[in-house]
Amino acid sequence: MTKPIKTIMIALLAVMFTSCTAIRDAVDSGKAVNLSALKIGMTKADVQTALNKKPDNIIAAKKYPETNTVVEVVQYTKWGDANAGIANAPQVWVPLERYWLYFINDKLDKWEIASPDRRPRI
């Protein structure tokens, strides 16, 4: 195989792999957030499995050295089509509701609807 063809093949493979990841992430972010599947005491991995979705991001984290306690707040977002119900309108995905899930030492302690007016309390 000549060098230019090999370079082109490598570039095409790189584009394929990165686009598959982007598509998977887009599909994952569009999934619903079913809070009825949650139970206090679940691990972060259990929550991710129950919701069938990765968290959007970590909102806050803090370690209390005197008790060796780690508190983390992760965010999940429920997305929806802003143009739902409008005939022939393109889909425009917008966040409908955000949820903060609080984990203490990797165990779900509580969850709440995220507030744009304040930060999570940890």
Image: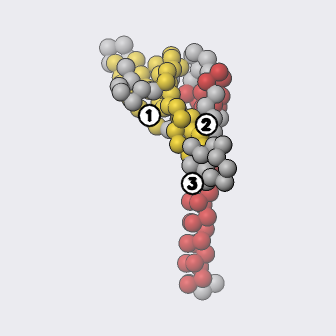
Going by the picture, which residue comes out furthest to the top? 67
Would you identify the image quadrant in which residue 115 lies? top left
Question: Where in the figure is residue 36, as x and y percent of width and height?
Answer: 65, 21
Of labels 1 and 2, earlier in sequence is: 2
Q: CA distance from mark 1 to mark 2?
A: 14 Å
User: Can residue 6 be seen?
Assistant: yes
Q: Residues within 10 Å of mark 1 (few under 14, many from 20)?
A: few
Question: Where in the figure is residue 11, as x and y percent of width and height?
Answer: 55, 72
Q: Give the left or right position of residue 87, taking residue 11 as reference.
A: right
Residue pointed to by mark 2: 53
The kind of residue tagged 1 is Ile
Of residues 30 and 15, the one drawn nearer to the viewer in this rendering = 30
Q: Secondary structure at mark 2?
A: loop
Q: Is residue 88 above or below residue 12?
A: above
The kind of residue tagged 3 is Ala
Q: Residues within 10 Å of mark 3 (few under 14, many from 20)?
A: few
Q: Secondary structure at mark 1?
A: strand
Q: Secondary structure at mark 3?
A: helix
Residue pointed to by mark 1: 58
Q: How is the image coloured?
A: secondary structure
Of residues 88 and 102, the one drawn nearer to the viewer in this rendering = 88
Q: CA distance from mark 3 to mark 2?
A: 15 Å
Residue pointed to by mark 3: 22
Going by the picture, which residue comes out furthest to the front? 87
Of labels 3 and 2, earlier in sequence is: 3
Residue at (61, 75) in percent of width and height: 9
